[in-house]
Image (cartoon, rainbow, N blue to C red):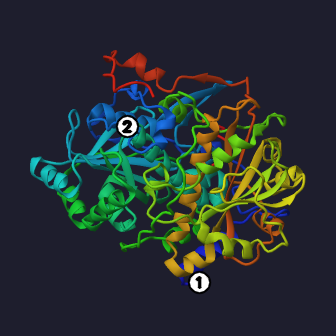
């Protein structure tokens, strides 16, 4: 293998492409005896049960996209509980023929959930200062590290008033168990979905959240206790967690994008002080083993090492100004908590449901970054991921192939990369600020299905799309860790599309989205005229009229806890009401 981290990352990407006559290397069949436990726990760590408070939030979904529309909630146990419930918590249980599995608010390829969540807090009413691990199954925090009064005050001094950190990590084995070498891609998708889920949940509480872009992986690993060998004694290397990202959550809205990113940068600059404080705390808990045995996918370990990030000050990119406020196309008066918790991945579409052009344009508009609007204000870089859209059933819009540019700066490079003699015409009736172009008019349902590993969901929906990124040039200019970041951005974009589909209200019928991780990379590239490694497809998505599987029984996410725990008083009113299908 090459010794250059960038070349290793690009080699991994090429190696893990699916082809018409050969899929990326995987296990071939699922070994159910080694299926990983989807829930990490730390035995011996004190447990803080969290109240179920998300249902009491009064914020409307439409107000998430209106900076300052939702008053900031106080930082206390109840509000922190709601943040985790709406971002990383369970959304339902499914049951079929004696098998039972949980769905979560943050989607995951194959419902395998490699992402783990952590909280670092200087203390809040009902919650002592310390580092906590979130257990979604139990809706509880395990206190991994307790901080005394002095370190707690020091931690509070390093963060904005009331601010705290949410950390994310990945267990690559959970995805590799099913998907083999391609699993590292899916773990990054899931990390992006989790980043977006945390940002949306924070917005529902009137809070800001921003990624600590400068933070190094070694610093994050130490901060979350992932490097504590004694706490993972007896746990196989494959069951260990890889540090992903940390977000600074601040109870103020709107902070403004620049202020939020400046605060995140300041927190990252104090990483050494933060890790010193947790290093001096009282640690507790031993990690559980997730599988009795494992398959060693060396290429995943190699790309994880190649994309390991050192602490580095990354330049923040200003978002383009001049975009009009988002239109209130969907959701009506639906609560934000309702949309965030009812998000589901469709497993099949009816092949009939259409959406109107206005609803279609509004969905795409929510994929454009605006200052102070989630989830895009959480990312400290300008858009690097764009979309090539297969339009199948959009009323008022001709079927065909379209390109969505999420940044004006991308136009010439994207036009050069999509090298076929496309039309590049603005559709009639498309909003002026929406950089959507018709490339060619044709019925591409069969092509979309073939591209997506012959999956009918790519053809039976209203539209599907492939997310493309300036991959090779970005890695060569910015470094190998950006391989992960590009996938994160694709996951954030997918999460926004999930929620917009869930919120859509259209006369053509209810729609739902699903992520597609299985696609023939170079078949899609050939269709678009893409050559070389500069522009590559990272994630596919589709939206359409869902067909519900009536064989499955759906159960409430925390019915088991509500039976076991004593009834809690209702929450106080907060004002007027405003990576693949999740299969077992």
Q: Position of residue 66 (x, y in %)?
A: 46, 42
Location of residue 26 (image quadrant): bottom right
* Camera-side residue of 127 and 282: 127
Q: Residues within 10 Å of mark 1 (few under 14, many from 20)?
A: few
Is label 1 in a helix, a strand or a loop? loop
Q: Closest to the observer: 348 or 492?
A: 492
Q: What residue did someone put label 1 on?
A: 2
Q: CA distance from mark 1 to mark 2?
A: 47 Å
Of callouts 1 and 2, the N-terminal one: 1
Q: Residue at x 78, y 41 (%)?
A: 461
Image quarter in which the C terminus is found: top right
Q: Residue furthest left?
A: 150
- Residue labelled with disc 2: 205
Residue shown at the point (38%, 42%) measured from the top left: 68
Asked whether, in this view, residue 411 is left or right of residue 239, the answer is right
- Residue 70 vertical placement versus 36 (above, below): above
Left/right of residue 228 with respect to residue 583 in the rendered view:
left
From the image, state whether disc 1 or disc 2 is nearer to you. 2
Residue 375: horizontal and vertical position, in percent?
49, 50
Left-right relation of 43 to 177: left
């Amino acid at each position: 293998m090459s010794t250059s981290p960038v070349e290793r990352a690009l080699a991994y990407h090429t190696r893990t492409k699916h082809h018409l006559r050969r899929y990326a290397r995987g296990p071939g069949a699922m070994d159910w005896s080694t299926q990983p436990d989807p829930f990490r726990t730390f035995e011996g760590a004190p447990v803080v049960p969290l109240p179920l408070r998300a249902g009491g939030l009064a914020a409307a979904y439409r107000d998430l996209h209106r900076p300052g529309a939702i008053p900031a909630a106080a930082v206390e146990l109840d509000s922190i509980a709601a943040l985790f419930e709406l971002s990383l918590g369970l959304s339902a249980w499914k049951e079929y023929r004696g098998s039972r599995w949980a769905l979560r608010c943050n989607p995951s390829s194959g419902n395998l959930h490699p992402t783990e969540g952590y909280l670092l807090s200087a203390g809040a009413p009902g919650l002592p200062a310390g580092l906590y691990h979130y257990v979604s199954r139990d809706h509880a925090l395990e206190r991994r590290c307790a901080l005394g009064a002095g370190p707690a005050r020091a931690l509070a001094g390093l963060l904005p008033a009331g601010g705290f950190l949410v950390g994310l990590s990945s267990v690559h084995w959970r995805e590799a168990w099913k998907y083999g070498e391609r699993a590292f891609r899916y773990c990054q998708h899931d990390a992006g979905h989790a980043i977006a889920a945390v940002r949306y949940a924070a917005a529902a509480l009137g809070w800001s959240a921003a990624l600590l872009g400068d933070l190094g992986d070694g610093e994050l690993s130490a901060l979350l206790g992932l490097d504590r060998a004694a706490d993972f004694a007896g746990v196989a290397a494959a069951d260990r967690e890889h540090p992903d990202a940390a977000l600074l959550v601040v109870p103020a809205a709107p902070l403004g994008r620049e202020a939020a990113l400046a605060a995140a940068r300041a927190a990252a600059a104090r990483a050494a002080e933060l890790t010193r404080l947790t290093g001096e705390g009282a640690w507790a808990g031993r990690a559980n083993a997730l599988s009795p045995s494992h398959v060693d996918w060396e290429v995943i370990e190699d790309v994880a090492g190649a994309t390991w990030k050192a602490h580095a000050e990354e330049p923040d990119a200003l978002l383009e100004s001049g975009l009009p406020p988002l239109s209130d196309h969907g959701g009506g008066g639906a609560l934000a908590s309702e949309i965030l918790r009812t998000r589901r991945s469709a497993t099949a579409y009816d092949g009939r449901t259409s959406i109107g052009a206005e609803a279609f344009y509004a969905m795409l508009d929510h994929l454009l970054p605006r200052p102070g609007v989630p989830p895009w204000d959480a990312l400290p870089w300008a858009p690097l991921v764009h979309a090539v859209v297969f339009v199948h059933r959009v009323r008022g819009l001709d079927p065909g192939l379209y390109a969505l540019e999420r940044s004006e700066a991308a136009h010439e490079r994207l036009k050069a990369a999509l090298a076929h003699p496309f039309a590049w015409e603005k559709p009639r009736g498309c909003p002026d600020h929406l950089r959507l172009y018709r490339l060619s008019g044709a019925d591409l349902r069969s092509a979309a299905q073939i591209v997506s590993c012959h999956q009918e969901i790519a053809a039976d929906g209203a539209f599907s799309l492939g997310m493309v990124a300036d991959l090779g040039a970005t890695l060569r200019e910015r470094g190998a860790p950006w391989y992960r970041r590009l996938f994160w951005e694709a996951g954030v974009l997918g999460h926004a599309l999930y929620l917009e589909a869930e919120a859509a209200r259209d006369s053509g019928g209810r729609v739902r989205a699903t992520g597609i991780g299985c696609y023939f990379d170079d078949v899609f590239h050939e269709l678009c005229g893409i050559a070389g490694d500069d522009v590559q497809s990272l994630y596919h998505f589709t939206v359409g009229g869902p067909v519900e599987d009536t064989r499955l029984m759906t159960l409430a996410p925390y019915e088991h806890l509500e039976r076991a725990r004593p009834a809690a008083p209702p929450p106080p009113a907060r004002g007027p009401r405003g990576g693949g299908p999740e299969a077992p």
